[in-house]
Image (cartoon, rainbow, N blue to C red):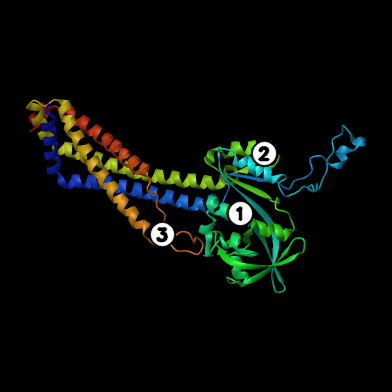
């Protein structure tokens, strides 16, 4: 049968039941709109939460962990050779915290094509002296330029210029919460005491806000040279090497390789943040489940509307068949109706989904806990739009297939005789 004629008849049936057609299309439109918006918002939220940790976390970390001696003194005694020795209250070994031969290791890692960059770090416990009160904290000695390039350090310094750590001698950036406890303003000098009992004055050049309040209460940053001087160490002294890779998925394998090659302890980002990744995955699954449920509900709406349309148009179907239309032609007419509703509703849903996402993206979101976020996060990934419209077309196809098949099997003789 002529395709143009089938389309013309489908158009007439759509317009004859215009209100029902609009209701079905609105159902698809609403479903696609909420699917796209929900996924964009939830994945944007996941990205925001992940960035609080992942932006500040190396893909591979090299360090020397504190652990007990593998061979205890009793094991070296000939008297107990070959015996099983059960030891309680094992003390940690007197190992060195710094990474041995760090210069050669840094050079070797920087030559690795898989590596995007490397930032050395020193982590040292200190006490900040606030009158007679000592506040326990940690000071991180960093290579400021590399920290800004690899770990977005500058985005978390909310007051002051982070490069001042490099340019200003004996300077420090305090966690905002720590600065409030110390009542320290920009330009003030704070006193700190190292674990060796040495006391040093440092000038405050900025405040740091990570978005994690407990973290900001105990953290401070200085240049790696300043911290080496505080601890009385030479320029080769570092306690951590933070490696960023070109491909984060290589982190577990690279960590194992570096542990063997450099004889240090290593930790990959997947291991360090396994719980965080689980939370992100669960939130994504919930978003997809809710969105797909909306589309399925819209499909049932189309199914019911087409069923009602077929019931009301039995005479029209009988006349079509009596005038030469085959069962397949009638089926094509009602499939055209269903797919028209799906296409129009789906495209409108994409448009409204984008507009609603843009509206949410403009809503101010200001909180002291998240200084780098100014509006609600939205992810505009084109994949969500493709998934949404594809699933809408699939849903409307099956919603129209069964009523259309029923219409194709209608016997015109029975309908006309009944009238």
Provide the residue designation for mark 2: 259
Mark 2 vs mark 1, foreground winner is 1
- Distance from label 2 to label 1 (Cα)? 23 Å
Residue 297 x/y as whole percent: 31, 43
Horizontal arrangement in the rendering, residue 44 relative to residue 115 (left or right): left
Residue at the image point whose x is 14% and y is 30% from the top: 3
Which label's residue is closer to the chain start, 3 or 1? Answer: 1
Residue 306 lies, in percent from the top left, at 21, 38
Of the 4 image quadrants, the one containing the N terminus is top left
Classify 10 Å Cα crowding around label 3: few (below 14), some (14-19), many (20 and above).
few
- Which residue in the structure is indicated by mark 3? 375
Q: Residue at x 8, y 31 (%)?
A: 319
Q: Find disc 1 in the rendering and name its residue.
A: 143
Disc 2 crowd, CA 10 A, few/some/many (<14, 14-19, 20+): some
| Badge count | 3
Residue 27 drawn above or below residue 114 = below
Identify the element where label 3 is drawn: loop
């Amino acid at each position: 049968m002529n395709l143009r004629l089938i389309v013309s008849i489908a158009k007439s049936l759509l317009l004859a039941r215009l209100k029902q057609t609009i209701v079905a299309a609105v159902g698809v439109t609403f479903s696609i709109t909420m699917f796209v918006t929900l996924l964009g918002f939830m994945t944007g939220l996941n990205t925001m939460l992940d960035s609080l940790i992942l932006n500040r976390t190396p893909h591979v970390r090299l360090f020397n962990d504190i652990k007990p001696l593998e061979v205890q003194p009793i094991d070296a005694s000939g008297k107990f050779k070959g015996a099983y020795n059960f030891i309680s209250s094992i003390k940690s070994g007197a190992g060195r915290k710094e990474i041995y031969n760090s210069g050669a290791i840094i050079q070797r890692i920087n030559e690795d094509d898989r590596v995007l960059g490397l930032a050395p770090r020193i982590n040292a416990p200190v006490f900040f002296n606030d009158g007679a009160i000592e506040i326990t904290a940690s000071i991180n000695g960093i290579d400021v330029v590399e920290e800004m390039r690899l770990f977005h350090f500058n985005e978390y310094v909310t007051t002051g210029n982070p490069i001042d750590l490099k340019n200003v001698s004996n300077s420090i950036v305090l966690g905002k919460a720590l600065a409030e406890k110390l009542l320290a303003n920009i330009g003030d000098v704070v006193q700190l005491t190292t674990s060796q009992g040495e006391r040093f004055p440092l000038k405050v050049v900025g405040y740091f806000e990570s978005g994690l309040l407990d973290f900001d209460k105990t953290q401070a940053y200085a240049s790696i040279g300043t911290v080496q001087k505080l601890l009385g160490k030479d320029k080769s002294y570092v306690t951590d090497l933070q490696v960023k890779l070109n491909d984060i998925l290589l982190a577990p394998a690279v960590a194992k390789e570096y542990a063997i090659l450099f004889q240090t302890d290593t930790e990959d980002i997947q291991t360090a943040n396994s719980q965080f990744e689980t939370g992100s995955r669960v939130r994504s699954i919930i978003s997809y489940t809710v969105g797909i449920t909306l589309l399925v509900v819209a499909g049932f709406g189309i199914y019911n509307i087409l069923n009602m349309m077929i019931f009301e148009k039995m005479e029209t179907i009988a006349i079509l068949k009596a005038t030469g239309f085959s069962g397949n032609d009638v089926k094509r007419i009602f499939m055209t109706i269903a797919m028209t509703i799906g296409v129009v509703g789906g495209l409108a849903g994409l448009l409204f989904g984008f507009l609603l996402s843009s509206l949410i993206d403009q809503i101010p979101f200001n909180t002291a806990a998240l200084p780098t976020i100014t509006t609600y996060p939205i992810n505009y990934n084109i994949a969500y739009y493709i998934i949404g419209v594809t699933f809408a077309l699939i849903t409307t196809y099956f919603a129209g297939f069964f009523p259309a098949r029923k219409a194709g099997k209608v016997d015109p003789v029975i309908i006309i005789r009944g009238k």
